[in-house]
Image (tube, rainbow, N blue to C red):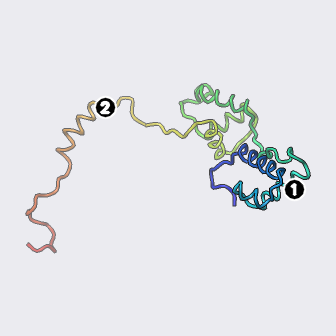
């Protein structure tokens, strides 16, 4: 059945549960009793009991990480984050915007590892970065003048509903 999308497994908690099962099995409880007590399937307890028999408690220890191994280690990720904090200008870009392509190129330049642009966002989220869009406001923008225009000028020029009882220009409306 697996986990819902985006939900990570707590490997430490899973290992603790297997160790509790090993202890309960060692106390002489049946696999069904252990399954009920831990709230797991009997087949899981059966698999754990088989592994306990073959390899002992070390066989129930933390399983290896699932999925493809990461291409960047913790030191490389730290170096990448430091480079990102320095800004794109220090990497030779004209403006201060990090794009997926720029980050991809930075990763390749610094580590020799090439990622697809779509995967770069996963790495950025892992580092705690999020997508930020520039406001796109002009430097010459006068906030006080804008507030004044919205408060006084806009009400003068916006359309108002016609007064009730005014004649309609519709040819289908009866006068």
**The quadrant where residue 89 appears:** top right
Measure the C-alpha gap from mark 1 to mark 2: 72 Å
Q: What is the residue that sits farthest to the front in this orientation?
A: 28
Q: Which type of secondary structure does the marked residue at label 1 adopt?
A: helix
**Is residue 175 toward the left or the right of residue 47 in the image?**
left
Q: In which quadrant of the rendered image does the N terminus lie? A: bottom right
Which residue corresponds to mark 2?
143
Residue 84, horizontal then vertical, whole percent: 61, 30
Taking the image as shown, residue 11 lies to the left or right of residue 166, namely: right
Residue 85: % across, % down: 59, 27
Image-based side of 133 in relation to 19, left or right: left
Q: Residue at x 13, y 66 (%)?
A: 169
Q: Quadrant of residue 80?
A: top right
In the rendered view, tell whether residue 44 sits above or below residue 146: below
Within 10 Å of the Cα at label 1, are there few (<14), some (14-19), or many (20+) other Cα atoms? Answer: few
Give the quarter of the image for residue 87. top right
Q: Name the spot of residue 44 as percent of width and height, x first.
A: 78, 58
Residue 50, label in figure: 1
Q: Position of residue 132 (x, y in %)?
A: 51, 38
109 relative to 56, above or below:
above
């Amino acid at each position: 059945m697996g986990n819902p999308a985006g939900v990570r497994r707590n490997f430490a908690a899973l290992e603790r549960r297997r160790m509790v099962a090993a202890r309960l099995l060692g106390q002489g409880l049946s696999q069904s009793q252990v399954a009920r007590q831990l709230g797991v399937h009997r087949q899981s307890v059966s698999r754990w009991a088989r592994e306990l028999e073959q390899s002992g408690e070390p066989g129930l220890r933390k399983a290896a990480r699932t999925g493809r191994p990461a291409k960047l280690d913790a030191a490389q990720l730290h170096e990448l984050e430091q480079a990102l904090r320095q800004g794109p200008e220090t990497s030779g870009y004209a403006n201060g915007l990090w794009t997926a392509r720029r980050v991809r190129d930075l990763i390749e330049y610094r580590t020799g590892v090439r990622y697809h642009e779509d995967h770069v966002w996963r790495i950025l989220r892992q580092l705690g970065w999020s997508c930020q869009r520039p406001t796109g406001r002009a430097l010459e923008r006068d906030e006080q003048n804008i507030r004044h225009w919205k408060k006084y000028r806009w009400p003068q020029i916006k359309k108002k509903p016609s007064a009730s009882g005014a004649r309609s220009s519709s040819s289908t409306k009866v006068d």
